[in-house]
Amino acid sequence: MRATSRPLTVVSLLLGMFLAAMEMTVVSTAMPTVVGELGGLSLYAWAFAAYMLTATVTVPIHGKLADLHGRKPVLLAGTALFLLGSSGCGFAGSMGALIAWRAVQGLGAGAIQPVGLTIIGDLFELRERARMQGIFGAVWGIAGLVGPVLGGAIVHTLGWRWIFWVNLPFGIASAVVLAIAYHERPERHPHRLDLGGAALLSIAVVALLTAVRSRTAGAAALPVAAFALGAFFLVERRAAEPLLPLDLFAQRVMAVSSATGALLGAAMLAMVTYVPLWVQGVLGASPTAAGAAIAPMAVGWPLASTVAGRLLPRLGFRPLLLGGLTTSALAGAALALLLRPGTSVLVPQALTFAYGVGLGLANTPLILAVQTSVPWNRRGVATASTMFFRTIGGTLSVGVLGGVLAAGLGRAGTAPGVAERLLGAERATLAPAEIAAVGAALQGAMGIVFWSVAGIAASALLVATRFPRVAVERPPAAAQAGPAERTEG
């Protein structure tokens, strides 16, 4: 069997993760322009929710498939799905088609991050692994910074379809390098995929999103969501390898961290989704400026996370968690108060930076506290469950707030199709009086959205006050190492 080239494998994984990480901020920048061309402002949130839903639900499934069949085929299959979805998004002729292809993208994205990090765990010893995790964390920070600016530039010069097509050459290069450089001999482990749990959770989330987005379908969708959620919990209690291990949540640390993480994810994704829409629709700024409005969040988050990691041994978990969420709640309230027509783009830039700082300060203690509070053999599933709730929170928030936006426009007597005229090339043909009238309606609806975001951030802080006092201590070396590492030396 040929030897694996670790440097080339790492390059391949970094490139794949960079594409997946950049996808959210790039698409956030492009979506106002997409709506201006394709229409469908009432479906705006579904373009994000479809991607997040399929990516979230398939993460544990891809992980188990990687144990059954090896990392390489699962990651290559996931990359292929991601690129197929990207190509389809670029050719989409309607919002419905775009949403469907975004779901396909998410199916592939659900493999890229977890399987890629699993390969890193396979290739590197414990000491090297910590350094590699730092490198991969930096990739997410860089992607968050570059994505909005690059997305705006692509939309302005080449058109929004290239936001998706630009993934193709880089994704193909990543897959080719991985196929050539990485070689494995899979260890076969008996696993049972919790397909029933994944299907029921998907039904519950889709039904819940439908209930909050559609008044006509809501009466039927809400009971479906409740039934699917109840059935999901019954299935998880009996599953040999559940998608979501329910016994973990008997611990207060896990329960509070998951609830806080869900609200934290909801606040983060809502900010990334709706601030660019406001900048382009209300201020009439370019897609590049819309992307630049949220770019500072991607700077503040990794900076604050690094600082939190250094302060945590001295301050403990609770002060950093509560301090970070207080910062985010204040920044969210300031956004709702200060984002008005005529406001400088510097205002949302400064406030999204503060928002990111708060989330970064809170994120590090939240994850580390969970990992500290469970034994080594449950650390992986506990971390994954926390991330699962965060992503589900983000998925639901963009859907719910999309309904809030549509309802706000409806109360102002403005149909979504009218507001869409502010987001595309048609804006230049509108009379100033028309722009002012439609802009005022959009501002009113967006004001409700931003106050909702501030409420989500405040709720995260309120829930976090129930976070228990977890001692910051370094366990003995033998307790930190896995079975393989304890046998060394």
Image: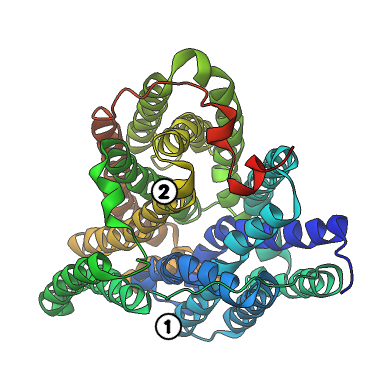
Residue 418 seen anywhere in this rendered image of the structure: yes
Label 2 Cα crowd, 10 Å radius (few <14 / some 14-19 / many 20+):
many
Which residue corresponds to mark 1? 96
Q: Secondary structure at mark 2?
A: helix
Tell me how far mark 2 sits from mark 1, CA to CA: 36 Å
| Residue at the top extreme, as displayed | 314
Q: Nearer the viewer, residue 106 or 88?
A: 106
Residue at the image position 49 percent from the left and 66 percent from the top: 59
**Residue 48, quarter of the rendered image:** bottom left
Q: At which x and y percent is residue 179?
A: 81, 75
Residue 267, above or below 363: below
Q: Amino acid at mark 1?
A: Gly
Residue at the image position 73 percent from the left and 70 percent from the top: 166
Residue 113, above or below 469: below
Query: Which quarter of the rendering shows the N terminus?
Result: bottom right
Which residue corresponds to mark 2? 382
Contact? badges 2 and 1 (CB < 8 Å): no
Query: Which quarter of the rendering shows the C terminus?
Result: top right
Q: Earlier in the sequence, mark 2 or mark 1?
A: 1
Label 1 Cα crowd, 10 Å radius (few <14 / some 14-19 / many 20+):
some
Residue 150 seen anywhere in this rendered image of the structure: no
